[in-house]
C-alpha cells in the first residue's frame, strides 16, 4: 500500500537518531535555531512524527550548515551515514546492529523496507537479485533525499560485513530511486 506524499511522515526516533545521536555536538546553536524557525523542528522537544517536508527542510539546512564545502550529493550521503551511526546508538538500533551482523549483507539489504519502516510510514522497496551479492534495489525515496539513502544503505551493509561494497545510484525520479548494490 502506497502512502500518499501528503501523509508521509518521519518518526521522532529517526530525528533523534540523526540529530541527537548521529550529529550530537556538531549541531551548533545557530543550526539548532534555524531548524526550529525555518524547518519547524525543535530538538528540545522531539515530536512523535514529522511531515516528510519538514524532514527534507531540516536535512537541507543541515547540509548547508555542516557541509557547505562539499558537493550537495556527498553532503546528503554523509547525513545518511550519520543517521545510521546514530540509530545504532539507540536502544532499538543496538538490537538491529546485532541482528544484521548475524544475518549478513544480503539478508540485511532484503530487509531494508522493514528496517526503514521503523523510522517512517512510507518506505517501499523492491529488489532484483542478479546474484546473491549483486542486488538492484528500488526505494520510493524522493529525489531530494536519495543520497541520504545511499549513505544509510552503505553504512548498514558495512556493519553487516560487506567487503568491497559498491552502492551505485542508477536511476531516479521524483518518487523512486534505484541502486545497484554489490559486494564481495
Image (spheres, rainbow, N blue to C red):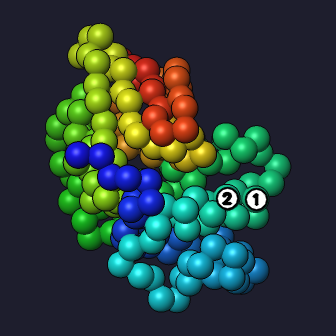
Quadrant, the C terminus: top left
Indicate the position of residue 182 as horizontal and vertical percent values. 39, 20
Residue furthest out toward the bottom: 44
In terms of depth relative to the viewer, which is nearer, 3 or 13? 3
| Rendered view: 35 above or below 4 | below
In terms of depth relative to the viewer, which is nearer, 157 or 146? 146
38 lies left or right of 181:
right
Q: Is residue 153 shown to the viewer in this render?
A: no
Indicate the position of residue 27 as horizontal and vertical percent values. 65, 74
Please name the residue shown 39% across and 73% down the image.
49
Per the image, the residue denoted by label 1 is: 64
53 lies left or right of 33:
left
Label 1, secondary structure: give it.
helix
* Mark 1 crowdedness (10 Å alpha carbons): few <14, some 14-19, many ≥20: some
Please name the residue shown 38% across and 53% down the image.
4
Residue furthest out toward the top: 130
Discs 2, 1 touching: Cβ within 8 Å:
yes
Label 2, secondary structure: give it.
helix
Q: Return the mark for residue 25.
A: none
Q: Is residue 144 shown to the viewer in this render?
A: yes
115 lies left or right of 172:
left
Per the image, the residue denoted by label 2 is: 60
Please name the residue shown 31% across and 58% down the image.
121
| Rendered view: 160 above or below 17 | above
In terms of depth relative to the viewer, which is nearer, 159 or 84? 84
| Rendered view: 85 above or below 35 | above
| Rendered view: 164 above or below 89 | above
* Mark 2 crowdedness (10 Å alpha carbons): few <14, some 14-19, many ≥20: some
Indicate the position of residue 87 as horizontal and vertical percent values. 38, 61
Indicate the position of residue 51 as horizontal and vertical percent values. 47, 67
Q: CA distance from mark 2 to mark 1?
A: 6 Å
Please name the residue shown 45% across and 82% down the image.
46
Amino acid at each position: 500500500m502506497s502512502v500518499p506524499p501528503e501523509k508521509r511522515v518521519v518518526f521522532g526516533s529517526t530525528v533523534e537518531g540523526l540529530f541527537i545521536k548521529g550529529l550530537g555536538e556538531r549541531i551548533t546553536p545557530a543550526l539548532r535555531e534555524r531548524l526550529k524557525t525555518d524547518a519547524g523542528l525543535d530538538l528540545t522537544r522531539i515530536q512523535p512524527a514529522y511531515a516528510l517536508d519538514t524532514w527534507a527542510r531540516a536535512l537541507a539546512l543541515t547540509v548547508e550548515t555542516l557541509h557547505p564545502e562539499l558537493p550537495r550529493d556527498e553532503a546528503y550521503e554523509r547525513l545518511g551515514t550519520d543517521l545510521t551511526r546514530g540509530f545504532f546508538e539507540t536502544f532499538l538500533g543496538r538490537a538491529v546492529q546485532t541482528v544484521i551482523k548475524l544475518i549478513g549483507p544480503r539478508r540485511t539489504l532484503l530487509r531494508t523496507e522493514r528496517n526503514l519502516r521503523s523510522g517512517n510510514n512510507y518506505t517501499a522497496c523492491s529488489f532484483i537479485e542478479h546474484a546473491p551479492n549483486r542486488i538492484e534495489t528500488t526505494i520510493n525515496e524522493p529525489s531530494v533525499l536519495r543520497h541520504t539513502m545511499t549513505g544509510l544503505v552503505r553504512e548498514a551493509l558495512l556493519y553487516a560485513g560487506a567487503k568491497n561494497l559498491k552502492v551505485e545510484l542508477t536511476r531516479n525520479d521524483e518518487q523512486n530511486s534505484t541502486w545497484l548494490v554489490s559486494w564481495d
